[in-house]
Image (tube, grey):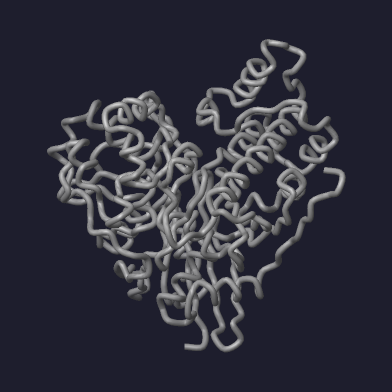
Amino acid sequence: MAERYIAAIDLGASSGRVMLSCYQQQTQQLTLKEIYRFSNTVKQLGSNFCWDLAYIEQQILIGLNKILDQNIKLDSIGIDTWGVDYVLLDKDGNLVGPTYSYRDHRTDNIMHQVQQELGTENIYQKTGIQFLTFNTLYQLKAMMLEQPNWLSQVTNLVMIPDYLIYRLTGKLNCEYTNATTTQLVNITTNDWDDDLLSYLGLPRQWFGDIQSPGNIAGYWQSAKGDQIPVIAVASHDTASAVIAAPLSHQNCAYLCSGTWSLMGIESKTPVTGSEALISNITNEGGVNGHYRVLKNIMGLWLFQRVCAEHNVKDIVPLIELAKKEQPFLYLVNPNDPRFLNPESMTEAIKQICLENSHNDSNNIPQSLPQLVRCIFDSLAMLYKDVIDQLSSLSKQPIKTLHIVGGGCQNEFLNQLCADICHINVTAGPIESSALGNIGYQLISLGDIKDVTTLRRIIAQNFNTKYYSPKENN
């Protein structure tokens, strides 16, 4: 077929998009158009923070129908979302309990308990996954402590993108890249770890057979009666973003920049030694036998929250003001767990700055531009630390950093990153998760040979900006 029309449902923790791509096989022209965008925020139910899955599903259908209203015949659909969060289903396919967000506080003290009971090194050697308080392992431990009565009601546990596929097709699927974010998949067998499931007291039959990305999970019957294949792409949004990143040589790293910043390298083997454990490096499943050896960084979530708290509608003038502030006067660790979901991000930053300056109130950012400068400087410094860790673990210097995702539009932070890390930086593509989603559909359909070819096609069709470190930095 000379021309393909592909839909990507790309869901982040703050917004969702239904994207349409047209691929001309002869010319290798790839286009991307945003059809529908919607906000996606956690909802507070009592003391818990949860996802509104019915709303998300409704918005997806609105977007898909907008495509059909243009008399476009889709060749396939793919879905990618954030990781770790899951859905519990009963025997009739109905939800058991709310769908908690990873920003919910019920896991605040659970990770330490599990580490004490199972051993930190034991968990890491089994899974290769970094320790984050909200990993599915700890969410499920919290559930068994708080809601053990759910055990008798549940038939299936599915990750968020697999649930949305189920809602479109009626078929259950268990996609590999998202499954690995649970910290329940054994890194040696690439299957669910029986010891961890036994520790949680959960039956193996809850968890489906893990499938490599690229299979047709089912078919969506449109209002016009068409049976459209739904392809299980690399459904963790970071996995899709990395597929679209222009990684062309071994001495380069990627930074998926958005609400979270995910910095890492591709590797054919996992990195699970003591240095990786100390650095809290993760080994998430990729495609074609590769692992995403990376570090989670709290990312632009801090900036987004501060802007929301101060009712900032246009961030460009604010960033210009922040550029003029004295650099590196205020620094925090962006990965401080207190930044995960504070009542006030502004106050959390000020409090940690106060602690870092030994209660010297003169070393607290007061104005909004100072707060923003603190966030960007702190992110750049953490980026440098992670670049150094990745260089040490891979035993080769990182010479280029490829920033992809919505955050790559922040030119000030891109240049700051180049300056502080002393490496060349490229920025783009912006919609990397959607492009990786679309690209893997095209690979599955047989239109594109492999990921290497896909990256070349994306680089030909989408602009990239370049940043070199400035000499005076």
Q: Which residue is most to the left?
A: 152
Q: In this view of the protein, which residue sits in the foreground, 439 or 109?
A: 109
Place of residue 139 in the rendered image (x, y in percent of width and height, measured from the top left): 33, 35
The percent coordinates of residue 188 (x first, y second) are 30, 55
Locate residue 350 relative to residue 94 in the image: left or right. right
In-image side of 168 versus 236 (left or right): left
Q: Could you tell me residue 326's position as x and y percent? A: 83, 30
172 or 65: nearer the viewer: 172
Q: Residue at x 53, y 23 (%)?
A: 343
Seen in the picture, residue 195 relative to 395 is either above or below; the reply is above
Which of the two residues, 105 or 5, is positioned nearer the viewer here?
105
Residue in the image at 48% along x and 41% along y: 275
Q: Is residue 395 above or below residue 146?
A: below
Could you tell me which residue is drawn at 44 percent across and 58 percent down?
Answer: 291
Residue at the image point whose x is 50% and y is 39% from the top: 279
Answer with left or right where residue 231 lies relative to residue 391: left
x%, y% of residue 39? 53, 46
Which quadrant of the figure contains the C terminus?
Answer: top right
Q: Is residue 194 above or below residue 36?
A: above
Q: Is residue 368 visible?
A: yes
Count of numbered badges drawn on the protein:
0
Is 176 on the left or on the right of 296, as rendered? left
Residue 86 visible somewhere in the drawing: no
Residue 23 vertical position relative to residue 214 in the rendered view, above or below: below
